[in-house]
Amino acid sequence: RGVIRLDSVTKRYANGHQGLINVSLTIHRGEFLFLVGPSGAGKSTLIRLLYGEEQPTEGQVIIDQFHLQRMSRRQLPRLRRQLGIVFQDVKLLPTRTVFQNVAFAMEVVGASYRDIRRRVPQVLDLVGLLPRQDHFPHQLSGGEQQRVGIARALVNQPTYILADEPTGNLDPDTAWDIMKLFTEINRRGATVVMATHARDVVNQLHKRVIAIEKGRIVRDEARGVYGYEA
Ligand code: ADP
Ligand code: ADP
């Protein structure tokens, strides 16, 4: 339980592009892991394989008791409930308030009205947006919108947070605030897997760093650095 395992995973796309080549990897409960590497290296592919958005061409992805290649499509929602997903492009519902955007993630998994009333303010407080709960997305800054995205990913208390360049659209100060939020979430017990180009953040946090190049893991360090110029 609480372990993510990739076993000799290769992902070839229909157009012939190699996403990943023979990647094996274990991520333990409570880890904070950065995926780094040039554009096109395979970071997003790895994250999409973890939430079942893509299937490997070869090999196995195993998360807790879920063998992603052996389970039926119907089990996917059960797995996804354990996963909080945060993207660069937040995609909030424009006609719903902050509260309603976060509540929606609980509604789709069938949570009761009572639990929603209790839980949504808790998670908005954690991301510092309780005072903005009745605002609409267009009334928020980019950093605030991303924090709503994080609240939405956290609201069902997932074991894992998967984040694909969550600070890619943000200025450096705002990016740091968001990163601090992820470290707090990790401190509270969630496993965090994050693809990022935020070089300074990676270099200062001393977390596990996995570098990917051309679909292969070229480096895996317990207290790593970004390791690329640019
Ligand atoms: P990164 O996230 O590190 O930028 P990606 O995982 O997006 O890398 O891409 C890895 C490789 O797979 C690249 O060659 C990219 O062009 C290719 N690729 C990614 N997604 C697709 C897709 N949906 N269809 C075809 N090729 C893809
Ligand atoms: P798909 O259409 O790829 O199957 P879903 O729309 O079912 O994905 O979303 C899967 C999970 O990811 C849901 O919990 C959803 O709230 C979350 N999610 C989807 N898009 C985003 C996003 N842009 N930012 C954050 N979470 C998202």
Image (tube, rainbow, N blue to C red):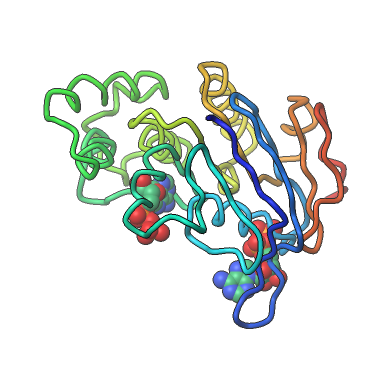
Residue positioned most to the left: 113
Q: Nearer the viewer, residue 178 or 5?
A: 5
- Foreground residue, 209 or 14? 14
> In the rendering, at what x and y percent does residue 61 appear?
59, 51
Quarter occupied by residue 48? bottom right
Label count reads 0
Q: Is residue 10 left or right of residue 157?
A: right
Pick the front one: 144 or 15: 15
Counting from the top left corner in percent of width and height, residue 136 is at: 25, 41
- Image quadrant of residue 128? top left
Residue 91 shows in this picture: no
Q: Is residue 111 left or right of residue 230?
A: left
The image shows residue 32, relative to residue 14, as above or below, that is above
At horizontal 50% and vertical 49% (from top left) the residue drawn is 87
Q: Position of residue 77 (x, y in %)?
A: 34, 48
In this view, the residue in front, 120 or 20, is 20
Identity of the residue furthest to the front in this view: 70
User: From this viewpoint, is residue 203 visible?
Assistant: yes
Residue 50, position as x, y percentages in the image: 55, 50
